[in-house]
Every structure is written in C-alpha cells, then in structure tokens.
Amino acid sequence: MGERDRIIVTTTDSIDGRRIISYLGIVGGEAVMGTNVFRDFFAGIRDVVGGRSGSYEKELRKARLLALDELREQAAELDADAVVGLDLDYEHIGIGERSMLMVSANGTAVRLG
C-alpha cells in the first residue's frame, strides 16, 4: 500500500473516533477529458440500457478516480492523515468539438491524533 493510499478521504468535516490536531491546507486534484471521448460514446450508444450509458459512466468514474488520486498525492506531500470536507465538481468547458469535461476534487488536508 502506497503512502497516499493510507489517506482517509471524506465529505464530512470530521472522522469518527479521531481528533484533528492540525489543518495543513487545501488540496485538490483535477482530471480533464476531451470531447472526442464523448463523441466515441455516442457513436457506440447501443450500450445504453434503461437510459444509462455504461461507457460514459465508466469514463466519468475514471476521471473522478484520477482527480481523487491527485488530491491524495498532494495530501501525502503534506504528510496528512486525511482529507476532510471533500467536494467533487463536474464542469463542462467549451462548445462542440472543442469542449471538455473537468472533474475537480478539493478538500482540507489534516493530521489526526
């Protein structure tokens, strides 16, 4: 298990049974995907079942995990034990062929006692 894999990440402002002893600062991670990925999804729309696209969801999940991995990496550089107050945002940037999807993850790196 790597250093960053031990870091607890939560949307809450505390961790049950643990005390925050220091706040180390805001950490974040981003993943940006080009629209060519999404055009490929729609070309293969046949895998849409019940109004959902498995391929599209898989790529969104991949982008979210990349953003969270980057967030954990920044927290590990600060020697944090956890990231609290996680906020995930999804943004569509641009128009048409030149548009992209950005997933950003932000939170506060903390040391626990």
Image: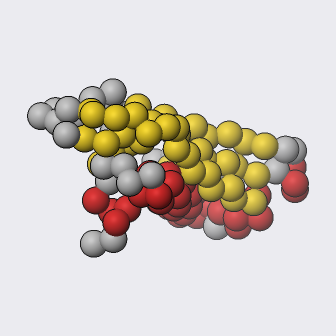
Q: Quadrant of the N terminus?
A: bottom left
Instruction: Point out the residue furthest to the top here.
Output: 13
Residue 91 position by quadrant: top right
Looking at the image, residue 18 lies above or below residue 28: above
Q: How many badges with numbers are in the image?
A: 0
Q: Nearer the viewer, residue 38 or 99?
A: 99
Q: Is residue 92 visible?
A: yes
| Residue drawn at 61 percent across, 51 percent down | 30
Residue 4 place in picture, x, y as percent: 37, 62
Q: Quadrant of the C terminus?
A: top left
Looking at the image, residue 69 lies above or below residue 104: below
Residue 9 position by quadrant: top left
Instruction: Point out the residue furthest to the left here.
Output: 17
Looking at the image, residue 41 lies above or below residue 102: below
Residue 80 place in picture, x, y as percent: 36, 49
| Residue drawn at 57 percent across, 37 percent down | 89
Residue 54 place in picture, x, y as percent: 49, 59
Q: Nearer the viewer, residue 101 or 113?
A: 113
Q: How is the image coloured?
A: secondary structure
| Residue drawn at 57 percent across, 51 percent down | 29
Instruction: Point out the residue furthest to the bottom here.
Output: 1
Q: Is residue 39 visible?
A: no
| Residue drawn at 87 percent across, 56 percent down | 97
**Image position of 110 (left or right of 19):** right
Q: Nearer the viewer, residue 81 or 99?
A: 81
